[in-house]
Image: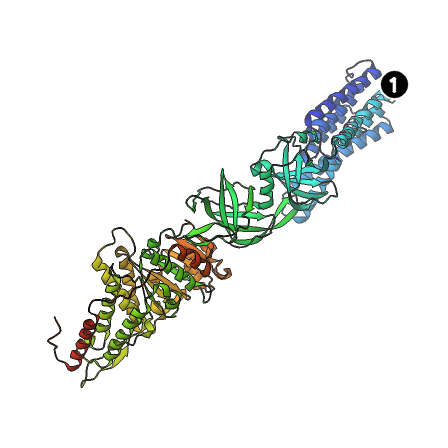
Amino acid sequence: MSNSPMKQSTRVWLLLINIGILSLGSFLAFGSWIPPLGDKGFWFYAAVLSLLLGSHLITPFYHKPVDVIAYTVPAIIALFIINKWTVWGAGDKLFFGFAVFYSCTLAISSFIAILTKDSQNTNLRQTSNILRVAVDFLGSPKAIYSPVILFSLYTFHRGASKELLWVGLAWALTVPLTPLEGLLKLASKIKELFAFNLPTELIGKVAAYQTPGLLLIRQTTEQKMAFGQMLLINDPYATSRMGVVLDYVGRDEGMLIRAIDITSLGYEQDVGSAKTLPEGFAALANMQTEQPDENLQVMLQNLVGIVAPETSIDRLYFEVIREKNIEEGKLVEASVGMKKVLYQIVAGLTKEEIVHQKNTFGYARAQAQKVGVWDDAKKKFKAVKWLPRLNSPVQLKSEEEYDLEIDSIGHFPGTSYSVSVKNIHELVTHNTAILGILGIGKSMLSFELVERMLAADIKVICLDLTDEYPDELSDYYDQATEDKFIEEVKKIGKKGKENVAWNVEEGGAVGAFSDAIEKHIEDFMKPECPRNLMIFNPSDFEVWKQDSKQFQGKASMQSITPTEVTQIITEAALRIVQKQGRSKDKKARVCMVYEEAHSLVPEWNAVATEGDRAATNGTARAILQGRKFGLGCLLVTQRTASVTKTILNQCNTLFAMRAFDDTSKEFLSNYLGSDYASVLPSLREREAVLFGKASSCENPVLIRLNDRDKFLAVFRAAHPPPELPTYVPDEPVEEETEEVEKVEAQDTGQTNDDVPF
């Protein structure tokens, strides 16, 4: 069963015993324990001693060409020293000639093998390999010196039967038969057979180590081994240990089993019984006496892989051992020192490597990004700035039911670990973007964020082209008051079509419209105003502007676009918060929500008119200036490429949902990294990659967003919508009359004395 070579100490003892046998043969043949000098002792000093030293100590296993030269040259020299060719008979010359020819042939072949080893010629290299194999087989000390000894016996001892008998017998017992070595191997095999006390079952021999922690075991039984089976391993070069079967990885004179040492899993186990095994062998543990502790059993149930090479501080690669329930977005756990650190799976690929000799092993390698260590008290992840050990275990976090918490914006898929908005005010003042294709839940997320702003007493002005916000946020929206104002301001916009002025900028109704909007927002921003939500659809307004000089009382008119309406509303909000002064407590005052932002603040190459380009620049300037006054924005779009990057680049918090276009992935890779950007096309509905200042996680994370109905049930129970009494601004009728009179005065070219200057 065992093919392992003997220890060097054992070979030394065998050498001493064999020399004792030869000395006994010398005593019986010559009457002296030390063989005589001269021809009578040639067999011992020149042949047998060199043979035994070479076989037992110098090259007991493999014979390189240089070793063969080291044996053959002394043999040839020794033969020529005792050469008496002129007086020898035919038999002596035959034995002598064969011994010299054999040694010379091996010496010459070894020289040729060495000289042609590195040749550029393929045939010469092939010849070198053939000679190398031949001299390894034919150039052992036994093969070289046996002809020399036979020559010595025939030439120097054939005339003395006593010498021939005892010298020949001593040589036979120590060189060709080697009975002692055979007896030792037999004893070793018998010991292996009786070394086990049932029910322990020997399964194989350790073939190799993959430091740290992994062992390759060459199976010697036909039993099918399964993941998680416990093994006892008697390691002659280290402490006896317990291992766990991982998988099969190849074949090498038996199936190769890969196992992991439980000490590398962070567990200690008393394995004293392993010392009863043959050295270097493994056996199935007796589960009645070697039962692993409960924590180890739980760990094995969740183990899905081991840490793979190229793992860095932020990125974990692990070899997948079991693929059950592994998928993109799931959390796995690895040990960094004494800490259990969580990582999120973001990618995977297949790999292949050599595990032992020429055995190759194909496997799946998963990639995961570091999330951190969960702080249950603070309900957030803390950073860990180091990496796990190679070949250490990676566990899949088990499926857990997620109970939505008030502060949670979502959770890691398949777990109860929640992710929250760390600071709703920073989400506003440092700007936020929600990006993704149509129909994946962007607006639902926007509704939730708006409700969180309203609960924090932050005013919200929604510019909504979809008309969904009034319905979804109806409990916060004073529909009657806003509808009344919108109807009044629409009248102002329409009347501007007839307002022709010498000064182009004074024509139309843009000025009157802007004044009315600013007055309405100013009333809205007053602390005593109970309303916190204002909604406009910029496409609903028909506001005319004069775009040419007056000629004969006429001029060309043009209706402003939604992009220009967006600029008017945003700049009005900025002027009002500037009047209120800097936000000393760094809290947000008002958030501008741009729904369908690609139509409200388009990129320069996506605008329909030059006026839109100027309007977008105006809106962007307002957003850039607004942070220190408590003004920020929430930008929602399905077309990242078509939104102005001036605002998008200022969004410090991002919710990236499913996207397919290269522009989105390229832009987001600068924020999230290429790993998370690459997962965007495969995100499910209601999944998003979150990263930024307002996130409770320091790194990008893939989360499952809250379902709308569950969010409403939990959040509104703690933050019920306020009652909305009708709020009437100071003297609204007079304000309206004043604006109309301004327009009428411009139409007639006369001054209205009732209008205060």
Exactly how many numbered labels are in the figure? Answer: 1
At 48% from the left edge and 42% from the top edge, which residue is drawn?
Answer: 387
Q: Is residue 258 above or below residue 409?
A: above
User: Farthest residue in the top direction?
Assistant: 31
Q: Quadrant of the N terminus?
A: top right
Name the element at disc 1: helix
- In the picture, residue 62 is in which quadrant? top right
Q: Position of residue 307 (x, y in %)?
A: 55, 44
- In this view of the protein, which residue sits in the foreground, 52 or 614? 614
Q: Position of residue 29 (x, y in %)?
A: 84, 17
**Does residue 631 appear left or right of residue 21 in this picture?**
left
Q: Quadrant of the C terminus?
A: bottom left
List the residue tagged with mark 1. 162
> Amino acid type of disc 1?
Lys
- In the picture, residue 489 is in which quadrant? bottom left
- In this view of the protein, which residue sits in the foreground, 118 or 63? 63
Q: Position of residue 677 (x, y in %)?
A: 46, 57
